[in-house]
Amino acid sequence: MLSEYRHEISELKQKDAHFTKIFEKHNELDETIRKAEEGEIAMSDPEIETLKKEKLLLKDEALMMILRYKKSKEEG
């Protein structure tokens, strides 16, 4: 997720518990979706779509936090 911000992600994971929680939840959802799509776990298409939407919201929130953090470092 957001590999172009690897450095900022690493720093935020060390400094911000909320960011870490969002990042970990995103990764958990990614794994669950992968398993569902590959048939390892039973899940309906609407359930998978719901998880994908939740994952996207988490990614958006994480990106906003990363950009805010990056901007504060540039200004500071």
Image (spheres, rainbow, N blue to C red):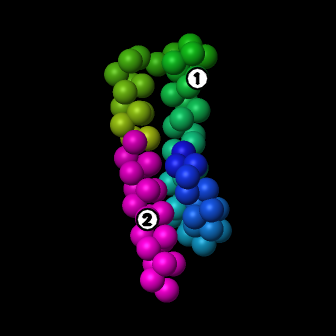
* Furthest residue in direction bottom, as rendered: 76
Q: Residues within 10 Å of mark 2 (few under 14, many from 20)?
A: few
Q: Position of residue 31 (x, y in %)?
A: 58, 32
**Residue closer to the observer: 3 or 37:** 3
Numbered range of the magenta stretch: 56-76
Do we see residue 25 in this rendering?
no
The residue that disc 1 covers is 35
- Rendered position, 25 above or below 6: above
Does residue 71 appear to the left or right of 12 in the view shown?
Answer: left
Does residue 8 appear to the left or right of 75 in the view shown?
Answer: right
Does residue 43 appear to the left or right of 38 in the view shown?
Answer: left
Quadrant placement of the N terminus = top right
* Furthest residue in direction top, as rendered: 39
Residue 52 image-quadrant placement: top left
* Secondary element at tag 2: helix
Q: Position of residue 71 (x, y in %)?
A: 44, 73
Please tell me which residue is depicted at 56% across the width and 13% down the height of the picture: 39
The residue that disc 2 covers is 67
Q: Earlier in the sequence, mark 1 or mark 2?
A: 1
Q: Position of residue 28 (x, y in %)?
A: 57, 40
Report the Cα–Cα distance between label 1 and label 2: 31 Å
Do we see residue 7 in this rendering?
yes
User: Disc 2 residue type?
Assistant: Leu
Q: Residues within 10 Å of mark 1 (few under 14, many from 20)?
A: some
| Majority secondary structure in the magenta region | helix
Mark whose residue sits in front, 1 or 2: 2
Please tell me which residue is depicted at 48% across the width and 63% down the height of the picture: 66
* Secondary element at tag 1: helix
- Rendered position, 15 above or below 39: below
Q: Position of residue 22 (x, y in %)?
A: 50, 54
Please tell me which residue is depicted at 55% across the width and 52% down the height of the picture: 4
Within the magenta stretch, is there residue 21? no
